Image: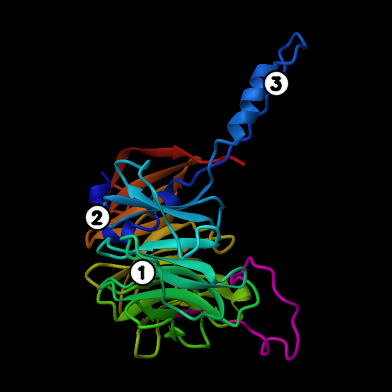
Amino acid sequence: MFSKIPSRWGRFFIYACFSTSTAIVFAQAPSDGVADHPRIDDVLRSLNRGRTVGQVAVSPDGKRLAWVQGHRDDGDIFVAPIEDLAKADRISADVKATEHCHENDVVWKPDSTAIAFFSDCSKPGEQSDLYISTLDGTPARRLTELRGYASQPAFSPDGRKVGFLYVEGATRPAGALAAMKPPSGIIGEDGIEVQRVAVAAIDGASPEAPDQVTPANLHVYEFDWAPGSKALAYIAAAPPGENNWWVAKLYTQALDAPPKAILAPADLAGPLHGMQIAVPRWSPSGKTIAFIGGLMSDQGSTGGDVWIVNASGGVPRDLTAARSTSPAWIEWADDGHLFVCENSSGTSQLLRLNVQGDRAGNGVVTFPGLQHPRHRG
């Protein structure tokens, strides 16, 4: 099945739709009051056998799997043939086997010949930079000289560049849920940290500061490459970013041009009026942008309906208005279909949505065997 996954699925297929849940097992004493010591000992021994997997990424050709193991947000990166995960190789920016770096955010190059990731090997515990590994046994190569917070790398479709979210000079992670530093100076003007899309070329002779391609007066939350690798679609709002996720707009921008707001929920009539938008996805043809829109409590808690809008702007169309489920992630399969990971009655399910199908959902096909109970808190 993995060989049929579109290339742009690689990063989020398993991690986004079927996240690992952790169960806590309590050993109960038998009703006669005698402690079941063998059972308790077996449970305690099994706790050390588990491995935390923070991210999984399938290569675009469906032949290999990369994952981050050890911590939720960073750890060790491994790559293995998808048919034999026991043959895993650790991939790291670390040139000394005795050292350990914090490494995360694995993303595959579109031709499946390399992975990019963030690592703090050059400045342990201080600063992460973007690295690329060609998976041929040679050391991973550092691409950037960063000074701030970086996340969510994404290869351009032509494989020549890597875009990522970057807050230059950041003192903390970006986002509406991160703790703010104490305000000082002129409130609302001084010390504001703006997250922008930065772009690094993969063929640089030495690590360089990336090009920040989005403007300094827009805080970008999420982005996607246009199919020609010369433009972006992104969700953004005026800074400060901590306050304005809930009023963000959808923008498009050529890399060498100013941005254009193509959708502002506050200005719309109908069910999307005043709602939040997330997960922008540019169609393979470049004509349409899909996104999720609805009432979302916080950034990352995505839900609502699947919408599409013309890449030049216009009135959006709701593709899932009659469905009782709530999508959390989307990706284009081709110009006529979207893959959707949605929450349905306490489960996550992966669907193939016919963009031209009727809004009652007749264009939806469930993949057999891809339902997984979600963790119930």
Q: In this image, 167 relative to 319: left or right? A: right
Amino acid found under the numbered disc labelled 2: Asp
Q: Which mark is residue 28?
A: 3
Picture residue at 56% right of the left edge, 70% below the top:
246
Amino acid found under the numbered disc labelled 3: Gln
Q: Identify the residue under disc 1.
A: 316
Relative to 260, residue 273 above or below: above
Residue situated furthest right in the rendering: 33
Residue 195: x %, y % from top left = 53, 78
Asked which secondary structure carries label 2, the reply is loop
Q: Nearer the viewer, residue 78 or 306?
A: 78
Q: Residues within 10 Å of mark 2 (few under 14, many from 20)?
A: some
Foreground disc of the pair 1, 2:
2
Is residue 85 visible from the viewing direction of this image?
Answer: yes
Residue 6: x %, y % from top left = 26, 57
Instruction: Give the alpha-carbon distance from disc 1 to disc 3, as whole Å.
Output: 55 Å
Relative to 5, residue 288 above or below: below
Q: Nearer the viewer, residue 320 or 93?
A: 93
Q: Identify the residue under disc 2.
A: 61
Q: Nearer the viewer, residue 326 or 331?
A: 331
260 magenta-colored: no
Q: From which residue to which does the magenta span run? A: 173-197
Asked which secondary structure carries label 1, the reply is loop
> Does the residue at mark 1 contact the one at mark 2 (Cβ under 8 Å)?
no
